[in-house]
Amino acid sequence: MTRIRKLEPEQWDPELREMTRADTATPLEQGLMRMVAHCPELGKGLARFGGALKMSRTLPERLVELVRLRVAFHNQCRSCMAIRYTDALADGLTEDLVCSLENPPEAQDLTEPEKAAIAYGEMMATNHLAIDDAVYDGLREHFSEAQVVELGMTVAFFVGFGRLAATWHMVEELPKSYQESHEPIAPWEAESIVVR
């Protein structure tokens, strides 16, 4: 059961509802915003920031999704691990690639830029102070300076809000495997749900 009371879209601030297209979204797609709607101005800010990350993205959708899922594993955010976004699927994400996240450095089907981005995301989620000049130099082998900034902002979003979502325990709409286990789980071990 979610630890913060969810608000139905008709209870949201009208501008927030419109910004997030809440009336046409499924409860799973409404996600964290169902709780954030208790604080409408914060919700609007979050929607603007999340929207800017998505709409201004230059990084490949597949890469971003792989990073998101690896960070979700470290956060143990069950709703984050269960979701697969259609943009990433259209960009080549498969469940076989998701299975590669169990051991990214050894995965044969991940590209070198994907491995570098996943390693960076993993460090941000587990030991951010280990990120040094060499890590950023390695990222620059694959990404422009602007893309390194974009990756950092995206990963910070995933780490912070994924941890918040994990503590709010939003599991009601998820497959049973995510609801029933109290042990750590992984996105490569359970069913997934595709959302837009």
Image: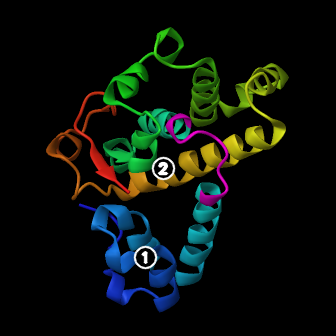
Give amino acid for label 1: Arg
Q: Please give left or right for residue 156 compared with residue 32 in the image.
A: right
Rounded to the nearest whole Å, what is the CA distance between mark 2 and mark 1? 21 Å
* 60 inside magenta stretch: yes
Give the percent coordinates (x, y) of residue 42. Answer: 58, 76
Q: Please give left or right for residue 191 compared with residue 118 in the image.
A: left
* 38 inside magenta stretch: no
Q: Nearer the viewer, mark 2 or mark 1?
A: 1
Give the percent coordinates (x, y) of residue 116. Answer: 64, 23
The foreground one among 141 and 102 is: 141
Q: What's the residue at 31%, 81% (across, down)? A: 8
Q: Please give left or right for residue 16 compared with residue 196 in the image.
A: right
Please report whichever mark, 2 or 1, sits nearer to the chain's N-terminal start. 1
Q: What's the residue at 47%, 72% (across, down)? A: 36
Numbered mark located on residue 162 in the image: 2
Residue numbers of the magenta segment? 55-63
Badge count: 2
- Which quadrant of the structure image shows residue 90? top left
Give the percent coordinates (x, y) of residue 132. Answer: 80, 25
Q: What's the residue at 78%, 21% (across, down)? A: 141
Numbered mark located on residue 21 in the image: 1
Q: Residues within 10 Å of mark 1 (few under 14, many from 20)?
A: few
Q: What's the residue at 53%, 42% (across, down)? A: 61
Q: Residues within 10 Å of mark 2 (few under 14, many from 20)?
A: many
**Location of residue 43 with respect to 147 vertically, above or below:** below
Q: Quadrant of the C terminus?
A: bottom left
**Location of residue 134 with respect to 64 vertically, above or below:** above
